[in-house]
Amino acid sequence: GLNTVKGPFSTDEPPTPRKDVTTYNNFYELGVEKSDPAQLAPSYFTKTRPWSVTIAGECAKPGTLGYEDLIKPHRLEDRIYRMRCVEAWSMVIPWVGIPLGEVLKRFEPGSKAKFVEFTTLQDPERLPGQRRSVIDWPYVEGLRIDEAMHPLALLAVGLYGEELLPQNGAPIRLVVPWKYGFKSIKSIVAIRFAETPSRTAWMKAAPREYGFYANVNPAVDHPRWSQGAERRIGEFLKRKTLPFNGYADQVASLYSGMDLAANF
Amino acid sequence: MDKLLRQGWVKPLLFAVCLIPLGLLVWRGASGGLGANPIEATNRFLGDWALRFLLIALAVTPLRQMTGWNAVARWRRMLGLFAFAYVVLHFSSYVGLDQFFDWSAIGREIVKRRYITLGMVAVVLLIPLALTSTNAMMRRLGGRRWQALHRLVYVIAPLGVAHHWMMVKKDITEPAIHAAILAVLLGWRGVARLRHNGAATTARPTACSVPQSSSPSP
């Protein structure tokens, strides 16, 4: 197991069983069915070390770091977060990770660094889903710099006290619990500080349906389904979806004055 | 082959085969084989099979005409009713499992979500076909009217395929396959009809030996 300390912001809701968290995944790089990633990962995405992450863009210390060098300076924290998928289901996941902001600060982002862009590994050998152009590979996601620096934002390396499994985005992934799950990009190989927001993978795939912010918002429906309620995995009845996935107290101020229906 | 297909045990066997998907679903449900989100899995599974049975039922006539196995015509009603049964199960799992009888939410969804609107229209249109599937109803309506009514399936099946297509998030492989099959099944009827009409109006009397079976039927 991983050596961790208790981190802040954890929910006391019962975690979703490990089996469900590790077998019900949206990771199109390993297939479009939710059972695909867990089934395909053991044959394809077996090697997640060595791993390196390239840091680029508007910062004083760009470069390429090995996984260990990226993680070592930080203490691993346990954080139990709610995860709300844009498809109207949710889980409670005990992550292990490090605060994203603390990592980003090491690279000394400059005044032009208004946004941060993340990129997933592109390797059709290991990620066979990329052999078909379901979406425009590689998967790209982005955050505004103040979102990225928010103490809730996490770079996760583990789950249930163990290292991340490939289907969950090994070896390092983003977790942004107040946004729909697709923002929490998996298997990150590049981080870039930028002056302008990125066109993310899902914005390119369906601009009408997926915006840059993707904050969990029961008041703004997906064009094809309601976001007012969600099914917590393991529960029968749907529960009401909370603004910012229940993290409004922490993050609502980031968006004061913004029209969240226009900036969906 | 046609003779073999006329054997008394064939139709009951086919009936049992048509129950396999349902049995598989029940077995998976009981053994935890439906995964982390069993309600979604159930709904998708039933929807997939509703659509497949619609296509299977629509394949009967082309199959009969292509192969000359007239025995398959005897299965058409049963296959059509299985399609209806899986549609009803799919609809029920949406209402009872997915929405848990939240009628106001269901009403909002029907109005607001186009793919649900189309699905509901398909369900409603199927009801008169199921109700008039008995011999007695066939007699009461008369062949011509009965056939006209049952041509509704040419609207229902595309609605079903469109319903699936519009629901899918990104990978449209499966709905595209369904659409292609449907296009072949409907296109085949169109061509058969054109040929039949052409033969009837322009050809010499001998050409009227076009087999009766080439007239389009649901």
Image (cartoon, coloured by chain):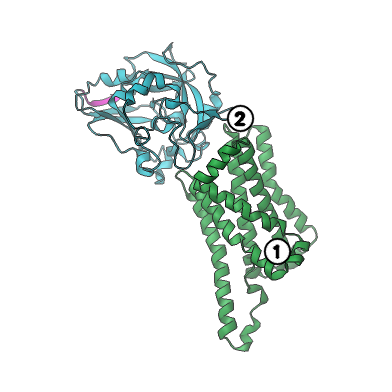
Chain colours: A cyan, B green
Image position of B73 with respect to B47: above or below: below
Please tell me whether mark 2 sits on a helix, a strand or a loop. Answer: loop
| Side of A87 relative to B8 (left or right) | left
The chain to which mark 1 is attached is B
Q: Secondary structure at mark 1?
A: helix
Residue B29 vs residue A8, the one in the foreground: A8
x, y percentage for residue A102? Answer: 30, 17
**The one of A56 and B153 positioned closer to us in this rendering:** B153
Task: Tell me residue A109's x, y (percent).
Answer: 22, 23
Residue drawn at 49 percent across, 53 percent down = B176
Within 10 Å of disc 1 (Cα), the crowding (few <14, some 14-19, many 20+) is some
Relative to A154, say whether A29 is above or below: below
- State the quadrant of the C terminus of chain A: top left
Residue sitting at x 27%, y 29%:
A115
Q: Is residue A66 visible?
A: no
Q: Residue A173 sits in which quadrant?
A: top left
Q: Which residue is mark 1?
A: B72
Identify which amino acid the numbered label 1 is placed on: Val
Instruction: Identify which residue is drawn at 52% across, 45% down.
Output: B111
Q: Position of residue B155 (x, y in %)?
A: 57, 59
Furthest toward the right, the residue is: B8
Q: Chain of mark 2?
A: A
- For image coordinates 49% across by 28% down, the residue present is A241
Where does the magenta region start and end? A61-66
Q: Main secondary structure of the magenta part?
A: strand
**In the image, residue A63 lies in the stretch drawn in magenta:** yes
Q: Which residue is mark 2?
A: A236
